């Protein structure tokens, strides 16, 4: 009898131990995957925050630019910079033949003319003098300098020629190649050239989409939730609505994209590829998430609070607005942020409504064409150039950072509310 | 108020039946409540005391499946009439619940909430006065006067219950309904609240549900005994406790069941 009991006890203990072990290993696995993922992203992505510059002496020769000695501002704007830009590149190797000169030109981004022009506009006194100018290196040389480029491939399989490598190595030796923080990654829109591609257009696109989504989904969802939870009679019809809200939350996002395509673009003729349409489409997705979160947190408000207010002679509306809704706000807000975070990472519906189009302008309003961060990741991941590989990881980092900031924000709001009530 | 030596009737319930869905919880209740007296409702658990109490300020409206039939006349007005405005009714009939349920706001906001929504104070000064007198009447003022702007949920259980009483009297109700107000309290806090009830009956009519025979005997002038949804017996507390007419009442009071 006693022995049996002891056996049973031992069994119970060992089963608890087994369970704890399984739980711990599950957590360990999850953390391990997360760590691997983050390590991979960071190790491939961190180089994107550096950009390689060639320091090239430029002769700001007035005559070549068709300028007189004392040019006005407009003159400087209109001057011809192509010739001096080209010359400064050719001067890297005075003995270059025509083919080699062409290769020299391709060692820098096609923005080099603009960069040289900016230099003179910033400091007009340079006219007639020679100055070292920082010029964005081509993405291939950028990758060479970062050590990401397989130099030992046969020449015909490389996008950089032996000649370019030779000149580049000379420049490196002379200290004429520098790596600096890649500001243009944040300030430039997308580009076909990896060295010039930035996330400004997709970042703004994401911000505008989220704002539109929030502006539509939050008020609609909160009103719907309050009505359903506090005012609507409980009958078959409201049950039916509840079931359908839950169904809506389970609809694959691409279906909402089709809806946006078929209704917002085709019927209402809203402008394609814009955060406005993207935000409306995303709000359809976010709506059920917020409704469900808001209803859950309304349900969690103790009924005794409602009774207290009602017994004081508050109307149902007053009870709801003065007591129940404020108490449910922390939960609603965190649900909203979770919904927005989901929307932020959403790609498929945005691709359908055309936010995948190549946009090389920075949107100034939700009505301008734009991409979004996850779509930008998708676009870059599709690109063949080596220079985009690190950009993909860097863009993921920005997206993750964005999400972390949002969650932090949610935490702060929740904390503030809770402080007030406890 | 006494008229010809007899207490005025404040509330009279006539043929009240209450149903939760199909289940009947109260059967044909007829009870008169005297003004400025304390009426205790006693009876075993589940007999319908709370249900009856909640009929008096129409709190049963909140429960979807609950249906109330019969007449409840307060100030010559049947509150079960369609024309009855529940908001006005509940302003006149305050309620204190079994579990203290202060709003998760400051003490001040707890008390000022009723007067605010009913527009009872014209200025901040008037509101301050209402808050102070309510808290004084509830014997809580001395303990909390320095922390009026701290959360009401930070008080002890007994203090919270007195806060709820102060909240209920802040709108000067004619009747105060109390559903086991002391069930969560220790003997000292209970004594304080009983003292308070005695004080409050000068200005308010009080109906209190209690499980403590001793409490009913101490604080009430009239007592009603409920059993299985029926009002078995009612009358002056003295009579009910000293020589009840019904055997069930006798058994319950002497602790033989319930
Ligand atoms: N919300 C409700 N839904 C359904 N039935 C209810 C509800 N509230 C009370 N009842 C039923 O009505 C009857 C009376 O309940 P009531 O709460 O009035 O009893 P009580 O006398 O206050 O009991 P206690 O002393 O335990 O508080 C009980 O049988 C109970 O099951
Ligand atoms: Mg009860």
Image (cartoon, coloured by chain):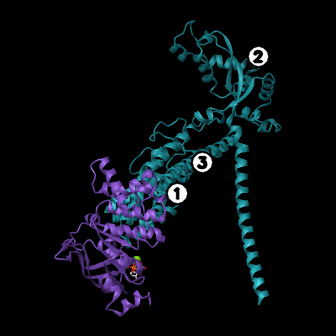
Chain colours: A cyan, B purple
Rendered location of residue A45, percent (x, y): 69, 42
- Given the image, what chain letter belongs to the residue carrying mark 3? A
Quadrant in which the N terminus of chain A is drawn: bottom right
Ranked by sequence position, the earlier of labels 3 and 2 is: 2
Ranked by sequence position, the earlier of labels 2 and 1 is: 2
Residue at mark 1: A253
Q: Residue at x 73, y 17 (%)?
A: A91
Q: Residues within 10 Å of mark 2 (few under 14, many from 20)?
A: few
The image quadrant of residue A11 is bottom right
- Given the image, what chain letter belongs to the residue carrying mark 2? A
- Quick check: B111 left or right of A341? left
The residue tagged with tag 1: helix, strand or loop?
helix
- The residues bearing labels 3 and 2 have C-alpha atoms spaced at a distance of 53 Å
The total number of labels drawn is 3
Q: Residue at x 62, y 47 (%)?
A: A400
Check if mark 1's residue and mark 3's residue have beta carbons within 8 Å: no
Rendered location of residue B68, percent (x, y): 29, 78
């Amino acid at each position: 009898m006693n022995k049996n009991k002891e056996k049973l006890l031992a069994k119970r203990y060992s089963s608890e131990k087994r369970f704890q072990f399984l739980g711990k290993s599950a957590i360990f696995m999850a953390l391990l995957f997360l760590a691997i993922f983050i390590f991979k992203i960071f190790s491939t992505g961190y180089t994107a925050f550096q950009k390689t510059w060639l320091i090239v002496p430029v002769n700001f020769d007035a005559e070549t630019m068709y300028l007189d000695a004392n040019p006005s501002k407009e003159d400087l704007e209109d001057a011809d910079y192509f010739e001096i830009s080209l010359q400064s590149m050719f001067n890297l190797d005075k003995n270059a033949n025509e083919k080699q000169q062409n290769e020299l030109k391709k060692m820098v981004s096609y923005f080099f003319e603009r960069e040289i022009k900016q230099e003179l506009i910033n400091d007009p006194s340079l006219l007639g003098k020679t100055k070292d100018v920082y010029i964005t290196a081509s993405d291939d040389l950028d990758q060479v300098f970062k050590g990401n480029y397989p130099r030992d491939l046969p020449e015909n399989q490389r996008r950089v020629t032996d000649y370019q490598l030779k000149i580049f190595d000379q420049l490196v030796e002379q200290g004429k190649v520098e790596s600096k923080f890649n500001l243009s990654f944040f300030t430039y829109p997308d580009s076909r050239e990896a060295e010039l591609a930035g996330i400004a257009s997709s970042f703004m696109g994401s911000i505008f989409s989220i704002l539109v989504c929030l502006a539509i989904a939050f008020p609609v969802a909160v009103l719907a939730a309050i009505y359903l939870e506090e005012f609507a009679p409980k009958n078959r019809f409201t049950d039916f609505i509840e079931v359908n809200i839950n169904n809506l939350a389970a609809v694959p996002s691409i279906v909402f994209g089709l809806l946006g395509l078929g209704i917002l673009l085709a019927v209402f003729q809203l402008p394609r590829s814009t955060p406005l349409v993207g935000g409306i489409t995303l709000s359809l997705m976010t709506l059920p998430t917020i409704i469900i979160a808001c209803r859950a947190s309304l349900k969690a408000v103790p009924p005794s609070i409602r009774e207290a207010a009602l017994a004081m002679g508050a109307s149902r509306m007053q009870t709801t607005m003065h007591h129940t809704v404020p108490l449910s706000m922390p939960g609603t807000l965190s649900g909203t942020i979770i919904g927005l975070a989901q929307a932020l990472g959403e790609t498929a519906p945005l691709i359908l409504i055309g936010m995948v189009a190549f946009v090389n302008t920075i949107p100034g309003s939700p009505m301008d064409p734009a991409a979004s961060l996850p779509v930008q990741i998708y676009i870059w991941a599709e690109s063949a150039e080596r220079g985009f590989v690190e950009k993909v990881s860097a863009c993921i980092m920005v997206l993750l950072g964005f999400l972390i900031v949002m969650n932090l924000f949610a935490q702060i709001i929740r904390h503030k509310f809770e402080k007030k009530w406890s | 108020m006494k008229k010809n030596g007899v207490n005025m009737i404040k509330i009279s319930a006539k043929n009240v039946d209450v149903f939760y869905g199909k289940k009947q919880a109260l059967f044909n209740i007829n009870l008169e409540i005297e003004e400025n007296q304390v009426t205790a409702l006693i009876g075993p658990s589940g007999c319908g005391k709370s249900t009856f109490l909640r009929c008096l300020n129409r709190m049963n409206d909140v429960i979807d499946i609950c249906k109330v039939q019969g007449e409840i006349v307060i100030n010559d007005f049947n509150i079960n009439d369609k024309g009855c405005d529940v908001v006005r009714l509940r302003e006149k009939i305050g309620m204190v619940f079994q579990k203290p349920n202060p709003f998760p706001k400051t003490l001040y906001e707890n008390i000022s909430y009723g007067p605010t929504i009913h527009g009872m104070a014209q200025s901040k000064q008037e509101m301050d006065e209402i808050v102070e007198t309510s808290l004084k009447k509830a014997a809580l003022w001395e303990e909390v006067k320095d922390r009026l702007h701290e959360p009401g949920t930070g008080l002890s259980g007994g203090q919270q219950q007195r806060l709820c009483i102060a909240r209920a009297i802040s709108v000067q109700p004619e009747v105060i309904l109390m559903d086991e107000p002391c069930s969560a309290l220790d003997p000292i806090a209970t004594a304080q609240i009983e003292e308070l009830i005695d004080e409050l009956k000068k200005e308010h009519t009080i109906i209190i549900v209690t499980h403590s025979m001793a409490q009913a005997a101490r604080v009430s002038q009239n007592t009603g005994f409920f059993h299985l949804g029926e009002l078995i017996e009612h009358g002056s507390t003295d009579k009910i406790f000293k020589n009840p007419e019904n055997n069930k009442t006798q058994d319950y009071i002497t602790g033989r069941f319930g």
